[in-house]
Amino acid sequence: MRRALPLLIGLLAASSILSPALSPAARADDTLSFPVLVPLTGFLSLEGTSQRNGAVLALGQTPAGVAIASEVVDTGTSPEAAVTALERAGGRGTVGAVAASMLGTQMLAMLPLAQELKLPLVTVSGTASITEQGNPWVFRFFPGDAVTKAAHARYVVEELGKRHPAVIYQTTAYGQSGKTHLDAAFKALGVTPVFEEGVDPAAKDLLPVLTKALAAKPDVLVLHLHSGPTALLLRQAASSGVALPIVAGSAMHQPSTAALLEPAELKGVCAETAASPISGGTPEVKAFTDAYRAAFDKEPDAFALGQYDGMTMVLEAVKAGARSPDAIRKALSAETFKGLAMTYKSDGKGNMAHSAVIVCYDGTSRVPVLAKRYDDPALAAK
Amino acid sequence: MESVVLGTGALALLVYALAFASPYGLRVLTVAGVYALATFGFQIVFGLGGALSLAQGAFFGVGAYVTGILGSRYGLGFEATFPLSMLVPLLLALPVGLAVLRLESHYFALATLGIAQVLHLLAVNLPDLTGGSNGLAGVPPAVLFGWTVPRGLPMAGLVWGLVALGGLIGWRLARGRLGRSLTMLRDDALAAATLGLDVGRLRLAAFGISALFAGAAGALAVHTQRVVSPEVLEFPVMVSILTIAIVGGRGRMAGAVLGAVLLLHLPEWFRFLERGYLVVYGVALLATVVLAPDGLTGLLDRIAAHRIAVRLFGRKPRPLAAAKEPPLPPAHPSGLSVEGLRKSFGGVRAVDGVSLDLRPGIITGLIGPNGSGKSTVINLLSGLERPEAGRVLLGGQEVTGARADRLARAGLARSFQAAALPDEAGVLEAVAAARLAVDPDAATAEAHARWALDRLGVGGLAGRSCDGLPAALRRRVELARALVRRPAVLLLDEPAAGLTDGEKAELAAVLRDLAGEGMAVLLVEHDMGFLLPLAGRVLCLDRGRVIYDGPADGVRRNSAVAEAYLGPAGSA
């Protein structure tokens, strides 16, 4: 013990000396900082990387006369790492807003500290409860589950005419939140799923749950899974000759998910999402897609676009004169912003996005086509 | 001197926290404290006890959920939630421990991992209680007797105050009877049982204590995060605790603190590398394990033991306790009686109807060719094997099939064919381990151990390590370990193997003295020149059966014995 303590002292001293030394150069006093705190490692790394890229691309549009700084920090998948990252970011100069993790449990952990530090969190997390905490510092630029799952269920029932869905969801915050909202949406449509089961994101074989689902005689498979499990289940369904239509969650629309599958394995598969930039659209969306590909050598998805829109709205507020986190929060709370994916407007709780789309694959390419758009603002209330 | 260094270290920590640490630095320090506290418990069950409990992360999570649920749903303060967060994991650990602690190494690890998985599933699938996968948000900060402990310095102070208290408790446990008994258990569970240590009870105690520490750490973790979700029950928490223990130094409370401080700060220093920090983190961990295989505390020990360091700073050997004769237990006038002992392994009957009497003051020899069942008889008599049939009486009491630790406490001691001394232990510690089950504290056990070492003429070895001792001295130390318990019956398995003639003569004199004091001695030996002059009576086994039972001087003339060793007369 007595020999250990000098080393402890050394470590702590090194901590205080190394941290500033290894960090980006000291900033001018008038620099506004926009830290990007997202999961780059762990089971959400694909989505988190999209989020990072969207934020970084947006922050490249520095408003004239304003010094902008940004630092990307990996939050992994633990709430503890996210809170520590936020505390770290909060202590470095004037923070305008934070591009915050899309992982619901990390957001829930960051919220009390964000309120204490008075920092706006701009996220694309779909977990419903993050905007139900009465915290005025959170802004979600991706439709919440109340919106997307209503669209999901409506497409299944109203467009496909199916009334016996089998629902397979993930046993994570994302999965449970989505399942709850799917249940409510199906109930509102007078439909009761014939099968519902949660699967662990680490499961390496989804054939058992698929077999059980098919045994319940469904007329459609409804998935709400993360990227990897979505691809695994679709591959196993295709190889088992499942002919039922499949309507998946937003993870399916990601190009990185589609890249895990052959186009033929995607035939008849649809997915809900906020947007699908690679499916084309306005010239502005095409310009975004081109810029994204050039910058990151990857295909953009709705998470990238949502985070891009969110940080662009933040920068619009800065352009309009907001120089403090509170001024940015007020702008995000009050203003309407026409982004690339949709028009954003807070519902008073920080839900900025109220539109969802359904995209479908035709079996010949990995680029989906827009099948249905749900712009009804009342979706959010359902 | 030690108190000066300790005070300096505490002061340095305080100065860092007060003068240098940012709120972020304080948070990292706070989280490091939380993990240090969890690792204290793991050091006891794994570091000292050698049981790879993968439930430590789960107990951490249970403590976190107790505080999260009681704090957020029922508004209970820290003074209520903190003890309950320790109590609930303990109450969970006790029945679980009773079920799984008898399992061996990797089976035990898997079973404890299973516990963690079950708890994780419950947390995910009981949303009404736990909030499901989202967990419970809005956990209040620690409220201590009406005072809300703010984040930053006060929270770091609370956590590190509890770390100091927990570290002190852990350190005292590690140095006391429990810690030494667990170390003995870790090094050689069979030998520990024959020294009277109740293996099951000790492991259960360690498991329970580890749960207490983990629960305390989990409670503090929730107050720093303000949210509890199933991530606290996931494997990464367990991996962090395990890594901290290994990197810091297995079994050392200082190692838990060093490991936690290093491993929690290391990734933070390289955050600017985005996901590349993991590569640096991995390389740094690998370098630490390669350069310091015994952990950082082991590395510091090596540095401190270096000649230059000793010359510069001096090194005082640990003061040894004064020798003290251990009290004699009540005499067993009837010694040990065995009737019809039988034991088979598969289709082989290793011991078949063996009967013998070990009388006080008599040395009884047990001979026989290799594989005749001698060691199995000793294992049966000392409780390491259970007989299928037969009866054993010790001091007139029925002890057939009794556990080794019960037999040891009843007055039976044994040695092993290969001296079972832990290489990492000092000679004095190794001998004192034999008194841990009976003496009130470790210091008394050491005083008694010195007496035994002196008695056998190896008192000078007290300050040495068992590692590297010559065979003769190892046997002498092991005999001291048996002797220090003042047994009524002493079973010795080939004690003269590898000794020179001079050393054998010295050993023979010691054994005669012990018998002269009233001890019943069973001596398994191949060396007839050593055994026959010593033994008053000799039994010879062949294929598990007694083929000779009589005076020592009759053995050489017995044709059955000669046939057992040499084969039938006239055979090729």
Image (tube, coloured by chain):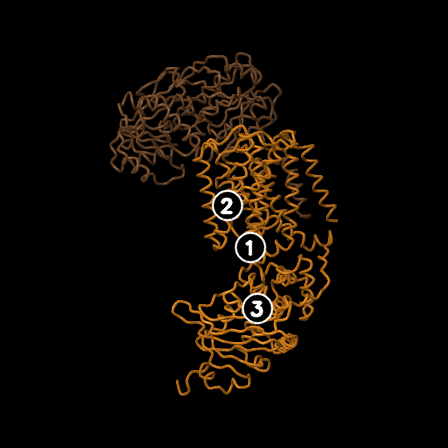
Chain colours: A brown, B orange
- Asked if the residue at tag 3 contacts the one at tag 1, i.e. Cβ–Cβ closer than 8 Å, the answer is no
For label 2, the residue is: B55
Query: Residue drawn 73% across and 47% down?
Result: B3
Discs 1, 3: same chain? yes
Query: Looking at the image, which is closer to me, A164 or A119?
Result: A164
Comparing labels 1 and 3, the label whose residue is closer to the camera: 1
Residue B197 lies left or right of residue B233; in this view the side is: right
Q: Secondary structure at mark 2?
A: loop
User: Compared with residue B411, is residue A180 higher up or lower down, i.e. above or below?
Assistant: above
Disc 1 residue crowd, few under 14, some 14–19, many 20+, Cα 10 Å: few
Specify which label sits upstream in the sequence, 1 or 3. Answer: 1
For label 3, the residue is: B415
Q: Secondary structure at mark 1?
A: helix
Disc 2 residue crowd, few under 14, some 14–19, many 20+, Cα 10 Å: many
Q: Amino acid at mark 1?
A: Arg
Residue B556 is at least partly visible in this image: yes
For label 1, the residue is: B201
Query: Looking at the image, which is closer to me, B137 or B305?
Result: B137
Q: Amino acid at mark 3?
A: Ser
Specify which label sits upstream in the sequence, 2 or 3. Answer: 2
Q: Tell me residue B492's x, y (percent).
A: 57, 72
Q: Chain of mark 2?
A: B
Q: Chain of mark 3?
A: B
Query: Looking at the image, which is closer to me, A225 or B221?
Result: B221
Task: Give the number of the disc on residue A122.
Answer: none
